[in-house]
C-alpha cells in the first residue's frame, strides 16, 4: 500500500503549492506554509448526482441588488432595543453606537434621499466562519465573492482556514470560481472549516487586527450567531478606535434560530435544520403509531432557546413538547416535569394509546431551577481548579443531595467543563434519558398503586443534532445566504463598520425581500449577572447580542398551545417528507416565520406613510374640526408612547 501513501503525499504537496502560489499572487508577500493547516480546505468535493444538480442552482437576487448599480439610503440613528441599557452600550461602543440603518435600492428607485455608490475600487475582504456549522454558510461566501467580482474583477476574497484560529494565524485561501465550484448550495463548513467560537480576549482581538493589517483587508466578514456577532461588534469598535482601515460586517448564520430581533427575522440554517429534523421526527411518529408500544424521547439542538423544538412541533405534530422557556417561567422542578409527562402518558393510556413522541430542547436541563443552581456550583468549583472526582464532596448539602439523586451517567455529564460562554455542554447532557428513567420509575409506581392501568412503559431515546447540521441546505437557506453575501459587499462599499447584513419580509417571495444593514449595537441588550453573594453582591452589566427565547406571549407560542391537546391525544402526526428542492414543498418556509408579524422595517415604512398622509391632510387651510381631531389623536398617541418607553427605561 506504499504507492497509495506516496500518491497521498504528492496530492498534499500539490495542495500546499497551490496555496503558496495563490497567496503570493494576491499579496506579493512571502508565505510560510504550516503543515498542520494543510487538510482538504477548498479541495474539490466528489459530488453525487443530486449534489451536482444543486451546485448548478443559482439563487435569485431581489430587484434591489440586481445590476451593477445599487443605491443606499441612510435612515434615522438607531438606539438600544431596551432603553435601560442604552447608556452602558453607548459607553462601551462610543464609535459604533447610534449609527443609522441602511436600506438598499435599485438604481431606478424613486427614493429621494438614496445615494448612488458610483466608485467601486478593488477591495480585499476576509471571511471567517466563527459559529457552529449551519446549512447555507457556503452560500454567504459565494454571494460575497460574486458581488465583489461583479463590481470590480480585481477585488479579492480570502477565506480564513480553520475558523478564528486561522484568522489569528493568518492562514488564508483565496476564493475563486474554481474553489467554489463544488461548494455552491452544499452543506457544512468544510470549504474553510472552523475551530473556536470566539474572538474575545485582548490577545485574540489584537491577533485579529494584526492579521487584517498584514493582509491589507478592507473588510472582515464574520459568519455566526449571537456570540460571534457580539464579538464582531467589539472588533468593529476596537478597529475604529485603533484607526484600523478594516470594516467589520456580521452575518446571521446559526441553526439555533435565536439571533432574532426587530432587524433580523431569521437565521441561515434554521429552515434546513427544522425541515430535516421534522422528517426524522415524523418517521419516528409513524413508527410509534405502527408498533403502538414505545414512547420516543427526542432531544433537539437549539442551545438555550427552544425555537427548533417549537418549529419541529408545528411541522410534525408530535404528542408533546416541553419548552425550556415554559419551565423557566413557571419555575418547574424536575419532578414537576416528570409528573407532567406521566400525566400525559396516563391520559393516553386511558384512550388505549400506549405510545407517543415527546420533544425536548437541549437547553431544557439549564432551565430547571434546581439543576441550574447545581450546575452553577459545579462550574464555580471547576473554575477554582477542583477536580471532577472531588466536586461531589464540596457541594452544598442540597446540591449534593440532588447530585447523588441523579443517575451515574448524568452525574458524569454535569461535571463536564462549561462552554466558552459559561453554559453547560448542553449537547452532551442526555436530558432525554434522564426524563425517560424518571418517567418509567413513576409510571411503575403508579402501576403498583393501581392508578395507572396502561401497558408497560417502554422508552426509546434519541438526540437529533449532528444528523441535520451537515444537511444540504433548503432552497430558502440557499437563497437567503446568497443574498446576505451580496449585501455584505454593499455594506463595505458604503463604508460601514459594525453592521449586520439584514433581509426583511422573508415570508414573501424573493422579489419582495427588503435588503439592508443594521448596526450590531442596536441589537444589543445589557446582560446582567451577579458576582459575589449576600448583600455585597454586585450586578454587572455587559452589552451583548442576547439570544432571543421563545416569546410566550407571541403568535407562534399561541398557535402551539391552541393545538396542544389535539396533538397530545389525537395522534395527528404530519410528515412533511424529505427536504425538497423542486415540487410542492420546495418553497415552503418555517411556520414560525410565516405566523409572526416580523417585517419591522415594513411596518416602519407603513407608519411613515400614515404620517405623510397626516401632513398632506392637516396643513394651513384645513378646517378647525380636522385640526382638532388630528391634535387630539396625535396627543393621545404620543402620551401612550411616552409612557411605554419610560416604563422600559426604568
Image: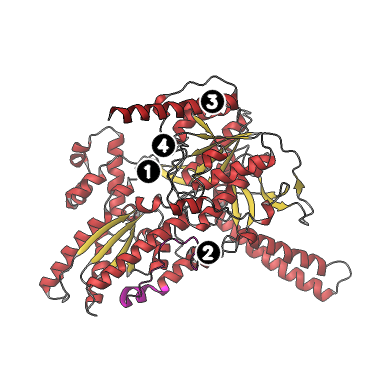
Residue 582 sits inside the magenta stretch: yes
Q: Assign the N terminus to one quadrant of the image.
A: top left
CB atoms of marks 1 and 2 within 8 Å: no
Q: Earlier in the sequence, mark 3 or mark 4?
A: 3
Residue 587 marker = 2
Question: In front of the other: label 3 or label 1?
Answer: 3
Who is closer to the viewer here, 644 or 209?
A: 209
Q: Earlier in the sequence, mark 1 or mark 2?
A: 1
Q: Position of residue 303 (x, y in %)?
A: 39, 51
Question: In front of the other: label 1 or label 2?
Answer: 2
Q: Residues within 10 Å of mark 3 (few under 14, many from 20)?
A: some
Residue 235 seen in this snapshot:
yes
Secondary structure at numbered mark 1: helix
CB atoms of marks 3 and 4 within 8 Å: no
State the separation of the CA atoms marked 3 and 2.
42 Å
Q: Earlier in the sequence, mark 3 or mark 2?
A: 3
Q: Is residue 272 above or below residue 171?
A: below
State the separation of the CA atoms marked 3 and 4.
25 Å
Rendered residue at 23%/56% (across/down): 433
Residue 491 sits inside the magenta stretch: no
What residue sits right under mark 4 in the picture?
195
Rendered residue at 50%/28% (across/down): 18
State the separation of the CA atoms marked 4 and 2.
33 Å
What residue sits right under mark 1 in the picture?
535
Would you identify the image quadrant in which residue 503 lies? bottom right
Q: Earlier in the sequence, mark 3 or mark 1?
A: 3
Who is closer to the viewer here, 217 or 230?
A: 217
What is the magenta range? Answer: 562-588
What residue sits right under mark 3 in the picture?
21
Amino acid at each position: 500500500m506504499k504507492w497509495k501513501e506516496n500518491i497521498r503525499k504528492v496530492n498534499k504537496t500539490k495542495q500546499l503549492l497551490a496555496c503558496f502560489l495563490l497567496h503570493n499572487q494576491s499579496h506579493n508577500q512571502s508565505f510560510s506554509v504550516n503543515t498542520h493547516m494543510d487538510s482538504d480546505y477548498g479541495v474539490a468535493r466528489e459530488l453525487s448526482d443530486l449534489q451536482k444538480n444543486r451546485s448548478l442552482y443559482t439563487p435569485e437576487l431581489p430587484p434591489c441588488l440586481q445590476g451593477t448599480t445599487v443605491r443606499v439610503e441612510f435612515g434615522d440613528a438607531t438606539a438600544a432595543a431596551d432603553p435601560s441599557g442604552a447608556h452602558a452600550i453607548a459607553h462601551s461602543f462610543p464609535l459604533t453606537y447610534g449609527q443609522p440603518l441602511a436600506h438598499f435600492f435599485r438604481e431606478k428607485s424613486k427614493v429621494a434621499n438614496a445615494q448612488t455608490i458610483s466608485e467601486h475600487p478593488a477591495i480585499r475582504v476576509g471571511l471567517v466562519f466563527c459559529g457552529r456549522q449551519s446549512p447555507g454558510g457556503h452560500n454567504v461566501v459565494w454571494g460575497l465573492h460574486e458581488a465583489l467580482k461583479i463590481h470590480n474583477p480585481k477585488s479579492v476574497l480570502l477565506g480564513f482556514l480553520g475558523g478564528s484560529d486561522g484568522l489569528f494565524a493568518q492562514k488564508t485561501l483565496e476564493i475563486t470560481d474554481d474553489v467554489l465550484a463544488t461548494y455552491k448550495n452544499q452543506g457544512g463548513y468544510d470549504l474553510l472549516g472552523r475551530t473556536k467560537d470566539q474572538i474575545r480576549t485582548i490577545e485574540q482581538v489584537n491577533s485579529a487586527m494584526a492579521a487584517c493589517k498584514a493582509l491589507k483587508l478592507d473588510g472582515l466578514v464574520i459568519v455566526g450567531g449571537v456570540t460571534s456577532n457580539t464579538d464582531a461588534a467589539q472588533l468593529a469598535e476596537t478597529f475604529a478606535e485603533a484607526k484600523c482601515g478594516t470594516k467589520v460586517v456580521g452575518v446571521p448564520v446559526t441553526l439555533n434560530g435565536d439571533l432574532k430581533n426587530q432587524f433580523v427575522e431569521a437565521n441561515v440554517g434554521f429552515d434546513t435544520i427544522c425541515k430535516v429534523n421534522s422528517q426524522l421526527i415524523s418517521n419516528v411518529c409513524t413508527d410509534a403509531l405502527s408498533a403502538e408500544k414505545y414512547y420516543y424521547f427526542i432531544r433537539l439542538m437549539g442551545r438555550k432557546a427552544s425555537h427548533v423544538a417549537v418549529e419541529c412541533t408545528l411541522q410534525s405534530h408530535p404528542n408533546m413538547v416541553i419548552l425550556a422557556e415554559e419551565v423557566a417561567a413557571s419555575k418547574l422542578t424536575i419532578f414537576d416535569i416528570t409528573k407532567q409527562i406521566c400525566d400525559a402518558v396516563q391520559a393516553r393510556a386511558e384512550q388505549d394509546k400506549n405510545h407517543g413522541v415527546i420533544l425536548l430542547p437541549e437547553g431544557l436541563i439549564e432551565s430547571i431551577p434546581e439543576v441550574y443552581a447545581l450546575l452553577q456550583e459545579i462550574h464555580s468549583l471547576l473554575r477554582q481548579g477542583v477536580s471532577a472526582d472531588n466536586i461531589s464532596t464540596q457541594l452544598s448539602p442540597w446540591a449534593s443531595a440532588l447530585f447523588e439523586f441523579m443517575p451515574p451517567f448524568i452525574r458524569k455529564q454535569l461535571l463536564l467543563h462549561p462552554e466558552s460562554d459559561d453554559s453547560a455542554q448542553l449537547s452532551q447532557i442526555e436530558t432525554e434519558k434522564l426524563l425517560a428513567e424518571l418517567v418509567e420509575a413513576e409510571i411503575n409506581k403508579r402501576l403498583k398503586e393501581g392508578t395507572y392501568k396502561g401497558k408497560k412503559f417502554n422508552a426509546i431515546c434519541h438526540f437529533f443534532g449532528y444528523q441535520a447540521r451537515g444537511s444540504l441546505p433548503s432552497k430558502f437557506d440557499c437563497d437567503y445566504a446568497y443574498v446576505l453575501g451580496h449585501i455584505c459587499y454593499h455594506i463595505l462599499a458604503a463604508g460601514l463598520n459594525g453592521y449586520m447584513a439584514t433581509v426583511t419580509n422573508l415570508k414573501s417571495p424573493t422579489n419582495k425581500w427588503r435588503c439592508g444593514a443594521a448596526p450590531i449595537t442596536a441589537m444589543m441588550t445589557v446582560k446582567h449577572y451577579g458576582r459575589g453573594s449576600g448583600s455585597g453582591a454586585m450586578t454587572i452589566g455587559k452589552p451583548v447580542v442576547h439570544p432571543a427565547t421563545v416569546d410566550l406571549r407571541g403568535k407562534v407560542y399561541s398557535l402551539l398551545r391552541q393545538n396542544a391537546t389535539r396533538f397530545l391525544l389525537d395522534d395527528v402526526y404530519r410528515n412533511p417528507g424529505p427536504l425538497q428542492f423542486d415540487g410542492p414543498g420546495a418553497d415552503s418556509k418555517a411556520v414560525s416565520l410565516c405566523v409572526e408579524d416580523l417585517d419591522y422595517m415594513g411596518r416602519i415604512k407603513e407608519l411613515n406613510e400614515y404620517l405623510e398622509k397626516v401632513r398632506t391632510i392637516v396643513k394651513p387651510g384645513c378646517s378647525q374640526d380636522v385640526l382638532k381631531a388630528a391634535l387630539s389623536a396625535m396627543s393621545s398617541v404620543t402620551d401612550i408612547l411616552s409612557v411605554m418607553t419610560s416604563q422600559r427605561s426604568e
